[in-house]
Image (spheres, grey):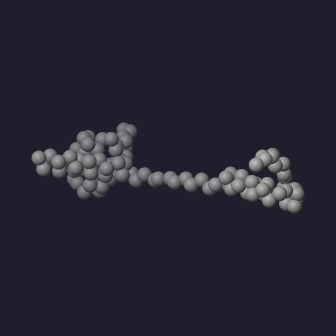
Amino acid sequence: MITRTINIDLNSRVSDITIGEFIELIRRYDSQQQPQVIVEQTKNYVHGLAGIMGLFGVSRTMAQKYKDSWLAPAIMQRGKTIVCDADLAMQLFEQKNQKFQLKKAV
């Protein structure tokens, strides 16, 4: 197959190109026009000890203990402002419960 450069512009007539050139143009256009799917994952955050209390259904004292121990990787704190990544917190909670279940079984 012979490859040649196709020089056309918007004023070129379709009758001036071959079927092969037309198909090649369509292929190039399709490959350039592939839709890019961008998936944005929104994070769920809870704010303050009250948010942690609501997320786990615990008292303020227990929420403080969680924040200072196993929940620490999900916590972002600047001064008095506390923000907790709820999705990560739930993953950490599941891991904690799995470890607890393993200890209980032994």
In the rendered image, which quarter is residue 69 located in? top left
Q: Position of residue 56 (x, y in %)?
A: 26, 55
Q: Position of residue 91 (x, y in %)?
A: 31, 50
Left or right, 39 with reference to 72: right
Instruction: Tell me if residue 3 comes above or below residue 11 in the rendering.
Output: above
User: Residue visible at 25% across and 57% down?
Assistant: 57
* Residue beneath the point at 36% across and 40% down: 77
Picture residue at 35% right of the left edge, 48% below the top: 88
Q: Residue at x 78, y 56 (%)?
A: 20
The answer to which of 67 and 73 lies nearer the viewer is 73
> Residue 52 location, x and y as percent?
30, 51
Q: Position of 105 compared to 95: left or right?
A: left
For this orientation, the residue located farthest to the top is: 79
Q: Is residue 78 visible?
A: yes
Q: Is residue 61 visible?
A: no
**In this rendering, position of residue 42 left or right of residue 55:** right
Question: 64 left or right of 74?
Answer: left
Q: Residue furthest bottom?
A: 15
Residue furthest to the front in view is: 1
Image label count: 0
- List the single residue furthest toward the left: 106
